[in-house]
Image: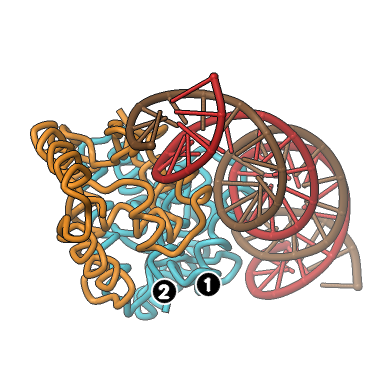
Chain colours: A orange, B cyan, C brown, D red
Amino acid sequence: MTDLITIYACLCDKTRLRILNLLLKGPLCVCHFQSILGKPQVAISKHLKYLKNHALVESSRNANWVIYMLPKKQSALLEKNLACLQDCVKEDGQFSKDVQKMSIITSRSTCGLSPKQAVTKINQRLAAYEKNTYFMHR
Amino acid sequence: MTDLITIYACLCDKTRLRILNLLLKGPLCVCHFQSILGKPQVAISKHLKYLKNHALVESSRNANWVIYMLPKKQSALLEKNLACLQDCVKEDGQFSKDVQKMSIITSRSTCGLSPKQAVTKINQRLAAYEKNTYFMHR
DNA sequence: TAGCTATATACCTATTAAGGTATATTGTTT
DNA sequence: AAACAATATACCTTAATAGGTATATAGCTA
C-alpha cells in the first residue's frame, strides 16, 4: 500500500534509518531505542509514529511498554528497500554500534531483581515471546 | 561523498524518481524531460538543480541545450540505490511509459530539416556522442 | 546588433517536518 | 486511590521544500 515515494520519505532521516536498521534484527521498545540512539523520548516517539503512520512499522503494547517491529507481511517494495538499506549500512560504524548495543540490552538477564519481580518479568517475556514481541527489560 | 540520507532525500519526490529512471537509460536534456514528464520547464530545472547539488547527476552544455546524465563514477551507495530503484519501478506503468517516450524522442531522425540544418545537427550529435552526451533534437 | 531558444534564477506562498517544552494518557504497583 | 513508569500528544518555532509567476542569462541565428 505504501508507495515508493513514501518509503523514501521515511528513509531520509538518520534517526529513522537507525530505528529501521535495529528493527531488522528484531522487535524493540521505545525506551530501548532511547538508550541505544541517545535521543530524547519525544523524538523517538515521534519518529516511530511517523513510521507507523506510513506502515513501515507495527506496534503492540506489553504492560507499560510498547514494542515496535517491522510489519509481519511486508510489501515487495518495502522488502527490497529494507534489504538495500541493510546492504548500504553494513560498513557504517554507527549502525553497527547500534546493533551491538541492542544485543547487549536484549540479552540482559534478570539478575538483581527480587524473585517476584523476576517471575513477573519472565512471564512477561514468555507472553511476549509467544506474541512475537520478545524483548527484555531489567 | 553523498551520504545515504541525502540520496533518500533526492529519491523521495516523484518527479525526481522519474528523472533518475530516465537517466538510467542514458543522458537527456531539459526540454526532453519537459515533454516526457509533462511538467513545466521551471519545475524540471529546479529538480535537476536539486539532484545536481547533491551529486546525483552531472550536466554538460551542448549549444543551447544542457544535457543531464548520471555521474560517470558513482559511489557504491548511489549505485546500489539506483539499482534498487530500477528494480522497484520495473512493473510501474508510468515509469515504463516514460522510458518508451524517451526512446521515441531520442530516435527521431533529421528528416524534415534543411540540408544545412541537418549537417549542423549531425555534427552536434557526433560531438555530443564523443562527449558521451548523445541525444537528439528535431 | 537584435531577436530567438533553451535554461536558470529570484521571489512569493503554502505545506511539511524536526526539535523542543510541557502535559496528557495508559498501565502498573503499593 | 495515589504514586509511578513508559509512552504519546499539543503546541510552538524554525527550516526545508514544492509549486507558481516573472525575469534573467547564455548561446545561436539572421
Seen at 28% across and 52% down, the residue is B85
- Image x and y of residue C26, in percent: 42, 24
Q: Which mark is residue B62?
A: 1
Please give the residue where the numbered disc 2 appears in the rendered image.
Answer: B128
Image quadrant of residue A6?
top left
Instruction: Work out whether B132 lies above or below D19.
Output: below
Q: Chain of mark 1?
A: B
Side (left or right) of A70 relative to B34: left
Frontmost residue, D23 versus B125: D23
Say which amino acid is labelled 1. Asn
Frontmost residue, A109 versus B57: A109
- Image x and y of residue D2, in percent: 56, 29
What element does badge 1 sit on?
Answer: strand
- Image x and y of residue B63, in percent: 57, 71
- Image x and y of residue B5, in percent: 43, 63
Mark 1 touches mark 2? (CB < 8 Å): yes
Do we see residue A98 in this rendering? yes
Instruction: Work out whether A134 lies above or below C9.
Output: above
Choose the circle earlier in sequence order: 1 or 2.
1
Side (left or right) of D8 relative to B78: right
